[in-house]
Image (cartoon, coloured by chain):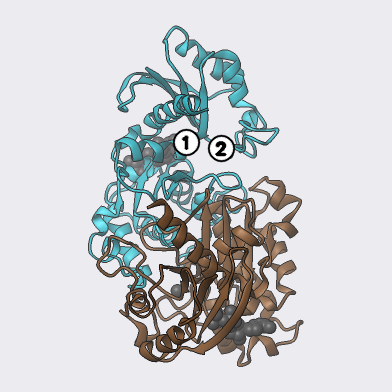
Chain colours: A cyan, B brown
Amino acid sequence: MFGAIEAGGTKFVCGIGDDRGRIVDQITIPTTVPEETLGRVAEYFQNKAIRALGLGCFGPLDLDPASPTYGFLTSTPKLAWRGFNILANLRRRLAVPIAIDTDVNAAILAEHRWGAAQGLHTALYLTVGTGIGGGILVEGQILHGMMHPEAGHVIVRRAAGDNFPGVCPAHGDCLEGMASGPAIEKRWGSKGRDLPLDHPAWDLEAGYLAQGLVTYICVLSPQRILLGGGVMQQADLFPRIRQKVREMLNGYIQRPEIVANIEEYIVPPGLGTKSGLCGGLALAMKATEARKEG
Amino acid sequence: MFGAIEAGGTKFVCGIGDDRGRIVDQITIPTTVPEETLGRVAEYFQNKAIRALGLGCFGPLDLDPASPTYGFLTSTPKLAWRGFNILANLRRRLAVPIAIDTDVNAAILAEHRWGAAQGLHTALYLTVGTGIGGGILVEGQILHGMMHPEAGHVIVRRAAGDNFPGVCPAHGDCLEGMASGPAIEKRWGSKGRDLPLDHPAWDLEAGYLAQGLVTYICVLSPQRILLGGGVMQQADLFPRIRQKVREMLNGYIQRPEIVANIEEYIVPPGLGTKSGLCGGLALAMKATEARKEG
Ligand SMILES: Nc1ncnc2c1ncn2[C@@H]1O[C@H](COP(=O)(O)OP(=O)(O)O)[C@@H](O)[C@H]1O
Ligand SMILES: Nc1ncnc2c1ncn2[C@@H]1O[C@H](COP(=O)(O)OP(=O)(O)O)[C@@H](O)[C@H]1O
Ligand SMILES: [Zn+2]
Ligand SMILES: [Zn+2]
């Protein structure tokens, strides 16, 4: 058995599962301050006889193994966690191999092993929830680069007449600032869940998300895009986004994936809401595989 | 010796060089119609005793070896070349292994072997010339994905008061539409080369290019960005772009590359104007290496 953590700004979901992505047990722990939250996390995994643990974590994170701050949370707006070495803290508490990556990189890894990105070499998992973030597989490798993608912070063009300032603390009106769950709530004074299907919020939302997708398609040329997270539970968003992406690309990318089969190109995650937690399992498996190789 | 072609919409540069990226001979052939241009290309390489040939080509291209139109130019605005199988045509004319990739993928490959991307695993080469295009190395692999990046066509935000419609035939005011060489010329009625350093064109240009770079940084997290092409010969653009990128990121990406050493992060190509042709050599070397493995 492997241990998995999906660490978010509001909750830590911890679980146990096997090497086929099946979760057999899980609990949810609220995100408070590091010592308290991680104390409860460690308590959960104690005596669970896991071989390894995978941590898919909110960010930004330092994931450069050569860096002195490897495994630290860096410029996160969750102040109690800023500059905190989450990896070392967990390693001190639990005597198993632990692998860390971003929550969305974990999710695309799980989707690649067991979900809607199976058989692909280049794919994007985008979560649209409290934040917007992308996990990216390119030519079979998880993209880290200098740090890791911050795909939610790309530049978007303001819709005509839209004067909403945006909610991103760093950029205001980047994609995350304009289209995350909190942006919807602040803009309309009501949570997305409570806005009716024919509310103008959804056309605007689809337009901003489609802009993000067009940018990702131009830069990454993914073979498929998976859209998850709370906001995407408004399932009506999918057809609207697909249509707008096709309109915005305007025939420039002549590929059947876009021109003919966009329903199979922009899709929900294959693992439903389990991509993140299964991603923890996939990371844990990687940790043991890396050990074998090393 | 290896053969190299840098195939562009206005000219084909052909050359011969060694496995250390040294070009020993080259010629330039104007891009007219395929039969004529490729006839002259083949004539040049005849009797040159090359082991393999690398073709860095304008696009869009079909680079999927499993596709029935592999090696074809697809939706290029150069109508005489649209739907033309450039790879098969060259293979018919020249009896050596030939590798094809985009012009900018060839360039980043050469920069990785011999230039300013040596030792990096994730880097971007952006050309700003007649078009804007990106060649991308990610975790040591050249990014193709579904097709290949079309990084020049990302969405940018219009500068306040800018009513220029843009020159991209597909999108109008995408990055390429707003900031390519022809966009500068159309907007100001004068070629970039002839606009003085204190002309407002340059601040606007730097602003649009910086937007593109911010987007690439958020999506790809490159370890370095190389800016080449005719427009970047206006060397004053570099400091302006660096400053605007830093302003736009607004502290969100806390990495020394950006916060402290941006002069080494956004740089000219190490091979100067030879990245493309050297890229042909690098592709040719890959063609022989692939053969050895296969
Ligand atoms: N059915 C829904 N329709 C629209 N928005 C929703 C829906 N359900 C949840 N949300 C929004 O999604 C956000 C939470 O996203 P979620 O992915 O569940 O969590 P997190 O991003 O914190 O991990 C909240 O802003 C919430 O309002
Ligand atoms: N010194 C310069 N300053 C600004 N723009 C320039 C300069 N030199 C060339 N250009 C512009 O660059 C474009 C050509 O780009 P180049 O990279 O040389 O060719 P291509 O993109 O066709 O391969 C033209 O639009 C030209 O006006
Ligand atoms: Zn932002
Ligand atoms: Zn365009």
* Mark seen at residue B10: none
Q: Which residue is mark 2?
A: A59
The alpha-carbon separation of the residues under discs 2 and 1 comes to: 8 Å
- Disc 1 is attached to a residue of which chain? A
Query: Left or right: B86 with respect to B50?
Result: left
- Disc 2 is attached to a residue of which chain? A
Query: Left or right: B185 with respect to A21?
Result: right
Label 2 or label 1, whichever comes before in sequence order:
2
Q: Residue at x 61, y 20 (%)?
A: A89
In the image, is the residue at mark 1 within 8 Å of ligand 1 by its beta carbon? yes
Residue type at tag 2: Gly
- Tell me if residue B19 can be seen: yes
Using the image as rendered, state which of residue B43 and residue B160 is in the foreground. B43
How many residues crowd around disc 2 within 10 Å: few (fewer than 14), some, or many (20 or more)? Answer: many
Q: Secondary structure at mark 2?
A: loop
Q: Are dots 2 and 1 in contact, CB under 8 Å?
A: yes
Task: Please tell me in which quadrant of the rendered image residue A274 appears.
Answer: top left
Residue type at tag 1: Asp
Where residue B22 appears, as percent x and y from the top left, is 64, 70
Where residue B21 appears, as percent x and y from the top left, is 62, 66
Using the image as rendered, state which of residue A177 and residue B115 is in the foreground. B115
* B57 w.r.t. A108: above or below: below
Q: Which residue is mark 1?
A: A103
* A200 w.r.t. A147: above or below: below
Q: How many marks?
A: 2
Query: Left or right: A108 with respect to B24?
Result: left
| Residues indicated by labels 2 and 1 sit on the same polypeptide chain | yes
Where residue B170 appears, as percent x and y from the top left, is 39, 77
Q: Quadrant of the N terminus of chain B?
A: bottom right
